[in-house]
Image (cartoon, rainbow, N blue to C red):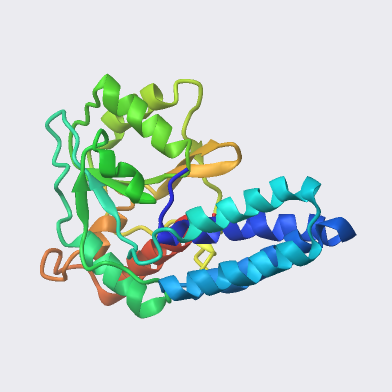
Amino acid sequence: MVYTKTHRTRIIPFLHDLLLISKKCVCSRAIYCAAYITIANLKWLKKENQLINMFDKIWKLIKRYTSKPNLFLVCCLLFCVVISTQHAGELFTIAQIQYGGGGDWYGDPSTIGNWLRLLRERTEIETADDRVILKLTDHALYQYPMLYLVGHGNIRLTEQEVTALRQYLTNGGFLFVNDDYGLDKSFRREISRVFPKQELQPIPNSHPIYHCFYDLPGLPKIHEHDSEPAQGFGIFHDGRMVLFYAYSADIGDGLEDPRVHPDDTPEVRELATKMAVNIAVYVLTH
């Protein structure tokens, strides 16, 4: 599992399920109370003394209501609390992937910085100021819940990178791929190595990624790219979308500094912003 501050939101649905189950059992009253307190506190927990106070409340409930057979379930709950809060001081950022093959992995240098700033301004997400650049084999990979891959040309992943990306995505991570124009052929080849038994699936306009914060009719078209329509594709694992591929849309270009693409109208840039905010919010809530 990828554990960061921003992944606390992924623990909350599990705790809600645990809460509903334990509420039906008198002998599990402590689990119910602990889950309730945890859900209430995950949204504001930032300081160590708050963490200590929360555990003190939970422990008092455990001693009051819990019999020995239930201690295992309580320990499981407390484990979830620990992993969901252990990085409470971190800020959300997006890691841009450095890959081989000759393509310009370093493209869109101002995109992530602007993206993070827009998230701070338009949502309550606490973000860093700029991107982090990583290789897929870097040990720090699991510190970041979301990766960004962009380029115009060829991508070539090593066998170690293929394995690392598969493990990252199937253990809680998310990859957003932005086709800058010319990326499609090599990306499809490489992602088929990562998930050989799956194909990229078209994402319907009704999918939550288009509606989770801003209500959009679908993937917006930012740049022409041979006049093809903008298309969103995804890869799923255990029912969770782990990869979103924006083809012939170029959301990243719409987020760059205005001087980079001076012909982009404010309306076009706003569409790119709304889609980018939706992607980040989706990642942090699913």
Quarter holding residue 117:
bottom left
**Residue 57 higher or lower than 166, as above or below:** below
Q: Please report the residue visible at 25 percent of the width from the left and 33 percent of the height from the top.
A: 137
Total number of numbered labels?
0
Taking the image as shown, residue 266 lies to the left or right of residue 145, namely left
Can you see residue 261? yes
Quarter holding residue 130:
bottom left
**Which residue is nearer to you in this view: 155 or 184?**
155
Taking the image as shown, residue 14 lies to the left or right of residue 52, namely right
Q: Position of residue 3 (x, y in %)?
A: 43, 51
Q: Position of residue 226 (x, y in %)?
A: 27, 45
Can you see residue 209? no
Work out which quarter of the rendered image holds the C terminus and state it. Answer: bottom right
Q: Please report the residue visible at 49 percent of the width from the left and 76 percent of the height from the top.
A: 44
Taking the image as shown, residue 42 lies to the left or right of residue 162, namely right
Q: Please report the residue visible at 21 percent of the width from the left and 58 percent of the height from the top.
A: 131
Taking the image as shown, residue 154 lies to the left or right of residue 140, namely left
Q: Residue furthest bottom?
A: 121
**Residue 249 higher or lower than 215, as above or below:** above
Q: Position of residue 229 (x, y in %)?
A: 39, 49
Q: Position of residue 98 (x, y in %)?
A: 18, 40
